Amino acid sequence: MSAAKKFKLKPMLGLAIGAAMCYPAIQQSALSVAGEPLYNILSGTMFSSPVYIDFFGIPIISVDYTGTVIPVYINNVMTLGYDNVMMPFFACTFATSAVVLAIFFKTKDKLLKEMAIPNFISGIFGVTEPAIYGILLPLKKPFIISCIAGGIGGAFYGHFNFRKFILGGMDYKKLPPDSFYPGREAVDAYGHYKEDIALFAELGLRCYRFSISWSRIFPTGEEKEPNEAGLRYYDNYIDELLKYGIEPIVTICHFDMPLALVEKYGSWRSRTVIDCYIRYCEALFRRYKEKVRYWITFNEINMLMHLPFMGAGLCFQEGENELQVKYQAAHNELVASALATKLAHEINPAFQIGCMLAAGSVYPYSCNPLDVWESMKKDRENYFFIDVQVRGEYPSYAKKILEKEGIHLEIGADDARILKENTVDFVSLSYYNSRCVRADGKGEASGGNVFASAKNPYLTCSQWGWPIDPMGLRITLNALYDRYQKPLFIVENGLGAVDEVETDGSINDDYRIDYLRSHIQAMMQAVDEDGVELLGYTPWGCVDLICATTGEMSKRYGLIYVDKDNAGNGTLKRTKKKSFHWYKEVIASNGENLR
């Protein structure tokens, strides 16, 4: 039966067949955005091979913003088999164009209207031009259609540039003046903290992790005295937590630093920033000496290598050795973390200072020794910085990596002693999924928390393509505890998903309950059966928030729904999801109801 006939019977099947048949043309395409190849924009993220980036580039970025993507490529239809693919192509082309036109007339969103016109025009004439159409169906309804063809890449310019921006590949000064920043207001925790904390108390939370904004305390990073108004806000926030018996867990630097330090010193590439960071730490340690016990020096320190601007404020000049800059910045952060640990213990010996990594064990795709070795190398990449923070020195494999890459670090005369004498008290981690690698780089790829991964055939995936692997959490906890013999603390674990508000106002997120249940059970097994020492568990996140890597609101993690959409519209009203009530029972029983 021809693809055209199948398409009449099963539209999605026909669409998929049409896309698959176009793969040879897709491989050879040279699409670009703002004159830059897609694989440059995405280098070092989901996929390492430009061949696959050409095919997956648009879907990856689209998934970041919405949900499900069905790619259809229109090019060289004669060479691909006219009879087999023209019906699906024509149907897709005009269907997508019709939806775009409907969006233009129906939506009140200015951004969508601006994007709809060029996409509609391209859709009509795209049958004879190279184009990729991504039909995005977050709620089984057409939401938006992106079309990149010829000279109309600007229609999706902001979304591409956001991805490139957080990866450190774009100068923030060159962002368009009308750029929309969802995180500027986000869900307005600043104005809703009392309401939020009251909900935390109703939930039964015994501890709550949050971060303090460095620039609220030292706006330029170089002031001699901290900003009293900023400290008063955190006074009130911490006091409100303590009022309900909720212990604060504070991340000192969570992908955040004063922009002035980026502009003046190039961020963490300069050792001057170490002194600025220690001044900031001292202000916090002395202010909250009797109120906060648990501190995390840097959020997911290993993300610096993958999200350099977001992770460490790093921007690169053309021709600059980016790897050299990243490792130097990482070394400076490691020294800063050790000095902060030293200072904390001097101010209050009862302080518990922790490091943090974006965790997730890396599986070999097969028992092929080459796959096993590749997985070991990837695990070491994750452990690199934590090895230093826990053991107090660079491991031998790390020194060999630096040597092989020609990296020459500027190391202070006292750095080795500082690192050795001031190791952390506990290891905290985020866990969303495991990873899987093949030495040959072939096979189907999978999504995940920034890191590239081969698709694991034994796992299901979230709406965003992230593998769901509760056993992976147990494996990860055991691997970390075996390696470090330090108490662990799970400070991030959760499921990003599109939540739908029912007509009665309820949010029935059973998928999130399933995810959390299975992961908490795995955590309990690691403690009860394997002997892992675990300080606590804080899911990501209690309240819906702006997704860090994509800047969207629709990818929700919270147990509490916030009325706000991707365009910034909404009342910010808080609503308890079904998962809120479920998790409340889990806390009340201390997990016994899950056994």
Image (tube, helix red, strand yellow):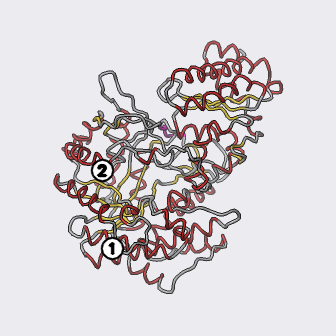
The residue at the point 26 percent across, 61 percent down is 232
Instruction: For marks 1 and 2, give the CA distance.
Output: 36 Å
Q: What amino acid is labelled 2 in the image?
A: Met
Mark 1 or mark 2: whose residue is earlier in sequence: 1
Name, please, the residue furthest toward the front: 177
| Residue type, mark 1 in image | Glu
- Which residue was labeled with disc 1? 282
**Residue 187 horizontal/vertical position (percent):** 37, 43
The one of 262 and 548 positioned closer to us in this rendering? 262
> Which region is colored magenta?
457-462
Q: Position of residue 557 (x, y in %)?
A: 39, 42
Farthest residue, direction right? 79
Q: Dot 2 lies on which element?
A: helix
Q: Which mark is residue 524?
A: 2
Q: Is residue 209 visible?
A: yes
- Compared to 42, does 424 lie above or below? below
Counting from the top left corner in percent of width and height, residue 353 is at 33, 68
Residue 334 on the magenta span: no
Q: Which mark is residue 132?
A: none
**Residue 89 % position (x, y):** 71, 22
* Predominant SS along the magenta part: loop
Q: Is residue 460 magenta?
A: yes
Q: Residues within 10 Å of mark 1 (few under 14, many from 20)?
A: some
- Look at the image and tell me whether residue 513 can be seen: no
Which of 536 and 269 lies nearest the eye of the viewer? 269
